[in-house]
Amino acid sequence: MKLRWLIPIAVLLPLRLGATGPAVSSRVATITINLNQVTALHLRPEFESTIRMPEEITSVILGSPSSFKAEHNEGEPQYVYVKPITKDPVQSNLLIATKSGQHVTLELISDGASANNANQPVDFLIEYRVSRSFLIVSDATVPVMPKTAEKPDSSGASPPHSPSVVPSAIDQEFEQQTKLNAPK
């Protein structure tokens, strides 16, 4: 009777020990949205990565749909789920647009199922945040400088209009400061 239980355990125990692979190191990152930066997202087959945006996502564009799968649904409007669908090493890009018009670009990197890259961490969660500032820019347009009436010269003719001039850095900074919400 005891032998009846001993044989299946003796057969199944080595199978369980052989099924465990090398441990995968994981990474969770919080990144500030920067339109001039491409974020590298390290993936691995059999693992799904999550991207969380600070606001509702309007579109997700995947560069290589034959190599990666990106999912987004309206029930979770701030999340995108990404995973490689091939066991080969592949790369592609992913573009995410939000409701306010911000765009995020990611480089998807999958080293494949090979065990030589076991030291490369897998990005399980990338959380994006908007940059924060103490300055609040108003949406209303405020005139930069009061316009002065042009005085005619001694002949009575008004001076000719100059072509549009590109404002200097100081003028641009002054314009930015006039748009700040400040106490009156």
Image: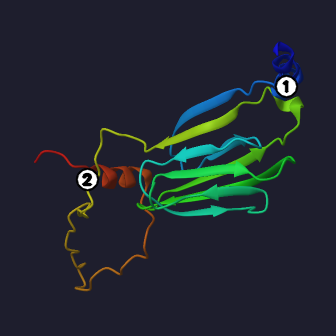
Q: In the rendered image of this protein, does residue 76 appear above or below residue 3? A: below
Q: Residue at x 57, y 38 (%)?
A: 125
Which label sits in the foreground, 1 or 2? 1
* Badge number at residue 12: 1
Q: Residue at x 58, y 50 (%)?
A: 36
* Badge number at residue 178: 2
Q: Quadrant of residue 60?
A: bottom right
Residue farthest to the front, as pictured: 1
Question: Residue 155 location in percent, x, y?
Answer: 25, 84
Question: Residue 154 location in percent, x, y?
Answer: 23, 79
Disc 2 residue type (three-letter): Thr
Question: Residue 178 location in percent, x, y?
Answer: 25, 53
Q: Earlier in the sequence, mark 1 or mark 2?
A: 1
Q: Nearer the viewer, residue 81 or 152?
A: 81
User: What kind of element bears circle 2?
Assistant: helix
Residue farthest to the left, as pictured: 184
Q: Residue at x 31, y 79 (%)?
A: 159
Question: Residue 2 location in percent, x, y?
Answer: 82, 13
User: What kind of element bears circle 1?
Assistant: helix
Left or right: 101 in relation to 62: left
Q: Residues within 10 Å of mark 2 (few under 14, many from 20)?
A: some
Left or right: 45 in relation to 49: right
Q: Residues within 10 Å of mark 1 (few under 14, many from 20)?
A: few
Q: CA–CA distance between discs 1 and 2?
A: 75 Å
Disc 1 residue type (three-letter): Leu
Q: Nearer the viewer, residue 44 or 46?
A: 46
